[in-house]
Amino acid sequence: MKQVMGPSDTFFPTPVVLVGSGAGEATNIITVAWVGMVCSEPPTIAISMTKGRESTKIIRSHGEFTVNIPNVGLVREVDYCGIVSGRNSNKFRDTNLTPVPGVKINAPIIQECPYNLECKVIQEQELGDFVIFFGEIVEIHIDDTCIGNNGKINLEKVEPLVYAAGLREYWNLGSQVGQAFYEGKKLLAKGM
């Protein structure tokens, strides 16, 4: 039997990312769990954060941001960047994370994160107390060590950190259980 729980933001897993913004000495990092792909062509990602955040102001000013996928070894740094304001601290210095200039934008990628996306804002939408930035992905970076022998990204080596929203818990991703666009064909073969 199922229990009715009422409306909530409890949803899992969600990627947890570090969003880089700004340029030069005026950069910031914010932890965001409200993030996801929204379009394939052009490749577009959406991030959502509250209106009052320092990063919201910076992204609006610069029109660009980076999405950095941390591995499970960065859980403390990720949590820190979500609970400390960039108005009062330099999160790069505080966490010993390394800002690296983007190739196509000025916002920094984070060296210690194995997967990085450079994004240009193409649209913005306010919803409640949040601002959703839609960013066209203009460049991707991945650590060499996270590419498998087949030339594809090896998620086991990336070790992405995920978040259980509402529960306020960080988790690892786990192991592969199937191949998309293949597993369902087994049911088709049975005539279902």
Image (cartoon, helix red, strand yellow):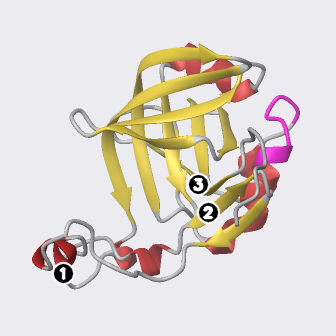
Helix, strand or loop status at disc 3: strand
Q: Which residue is mark 2?
A: 162
- Label ID, residue 14: 3
Residue 129 percent across, percent down from the top left:
74, 19
How crowded pointer 1 is (Cα within 10 Å; few <14, some 14-19, many 20+) is rated as few
**Residue 43 in the figure: left or right of residue 186:** right
In this view, the residue in front, 3 or 33, is: 3
Mark 2 touches mark 3? (CB < 8 Å): yes
Which numbered dot is residue 49? none
- Say above or below: 61 vs 17: above
Disc 1 target residue: 150
Residue 112: image x %, image y %?
A: 57, 64
Mark 1 element type: loop
In the image, is 119 to the left or to the right of 30? left
Estimate how packed mark 3 is, as few (under 14), some (14 to 19) or many (20 or more) residues with alpha carbons within 10 Å.
some
Q: Which is nearer the eye, 148 or 110?
A: 148
Task: Quadrant for the N terminus, please.
Answer: bottom right
Q: Which quadrant of the view contains residue 150?
A: bottom left
Q: Please report the bounds of the magenta region as a residue range.
A: 82-88
Front-most of 34 and 79?
34
Q: Is most of the magenta stretch helix, strand or loop? A: loop
Magenta stretch holds residue 107: no
* Label 2 with label 1: CB-CB less than 8 Å: no
Q: Quadrant of residue 191?
A: bottom left
Q: Amino acid at mark 1?
A: Asn
Residue 23 at least partly seen: no
**Whole-number angstrom distance, CA of label 2 to CA of label 3:** 6 Å
